[in-house]
Amino acid sequence: MVVTGIYYALTLTALGVALGWLFSPWCGVGFYVLAAFCLWFFRDPERNIPQGPVAVSPADGKVVLIRRRPEDSQVCIFLNVFNVHVNRAPIAGKVVGVDYKKGKFHVASKEEASFENEMNTITIDGDRTLVKFSQIAGLIARRIVCYKKPGDFVTAGERVGLIKFGSRVDMTLGPEWDVVVEEGQRVAGGSSIIARRKDQGPSA
């Protein structure tokens, strides 16, 4: 459970109790429901992290777009309010960049969200490869949380932050990676394999 969810739930519960005490017990029911939703929304399940020369999904959600270019490939994952919103490192390595950019709040499933929305881009340098992934705010999500800073070392699948409510994560990989997911596929953060290294064998 993410601590943020507990804070939200306690605040909403307190409001419900206050309204129930001032007016009627029924006045607080809506706040109790919202408190329960926050506890569920900010869940943080354990995941089995695949081993070997692979890049795992940085987020739960649906692959809405794959851009394949000569210089790199980009995998775009849309998270709705029912997905787990904890973000994870796709590969092990050193965080060499954390770059925040202000922006708009388009619906996160739309393509323009990749370029125009508020976002935080994390770059990881690991074993002769750079992998970037952007935490992108959506129409509802207006709060991006990142636990890491440049110079930190991460393991594959390690928790690195979260985006509150509906959002998007775009992941960019160099030509040394072979993307193995397809558009429309649902993935789980930390456990679904997004890509495999072309220049390494099946084992780490």
Image (cartoon, rainbow, N blue to C red):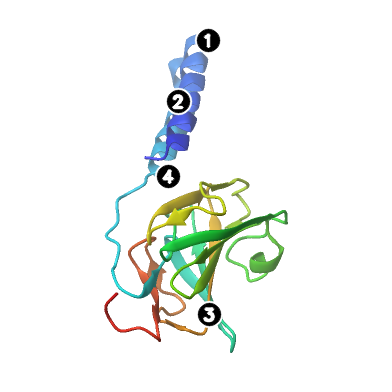
Q: Residue at x 47, y 75 (%)?
A: 128
Q: What is the distance, in whole Å, between disc 4 and disc 2 at their CAs?
A: 14 Å
Measured as percent of width and height from the top left, residue 69 is found at 59, 86
> The residue under label 1 is which amino acid type?
Leu
Q: Sort mark 1 into few (<14), some (14-19) or many (20+) by Cα contacts within 10 Å.
A: few
Q: Which quadrant is home to the N terminus? A: top left
Q: In this picture, is 87 found above or below 179?
A: above
- Sequence-wise, the earlier of marks 2 and 1 is 2
The nearer-to-camera label among 1 and 3 is: 3
Name the residue that disc number 1 marks.
22
Element class at badge 1: helix
> The residue under label 2 is which amino acid type?
Leu
Name the residue that disc number 3 marks.
174
Using the image as rendered, state which of residue 88 and residue 112 is in the foreground.
88
Please indicate, yes or no, whether residue 91 appears anywhere in the rendered image: yes
Q: What is the distance, in whole Å, between disc 4 and disc 1 at their CAs?
A: 29 Å
Element class at badge 2: helix
Label drawn at residue 41: 4
The nearer-to-camera label among 4 and 1 is: 4
Measured as percent of width and height from the top left, residue 51 is found at 28, 69
- Whether tag 4 and tag 2 are in contact, CB under 8 A, the answer is no
Q: What is the distance, in whole Å, between disc 2 and disc 3 at their CAs?
A: 44 Å
Using the image as rendered, state which of residue 190 and residue 9 is in the foreground.
190
Please indicate, yes or no, whether residue 85 appears anywhere in the rendered image: no
Using the image as rendered, state which of residue 83 and residue 95 is in the foreground.
95
- Sequence-wise, the earlier of marks 4 and 2 is 2
Name the residue that disc number 2 marks.
10
The nearer-to-camera label among 2 and 1 is: 2
Q: Which quadrant is home to the C terminus? A: bottom left
Position of residue 68 in the picture relative to residue 1 (left or right): right
Q: In this picture, is 198 found above or below 25?
A: below
Measured as percent of width and height from the top left, residue 125 is found at 50, 67
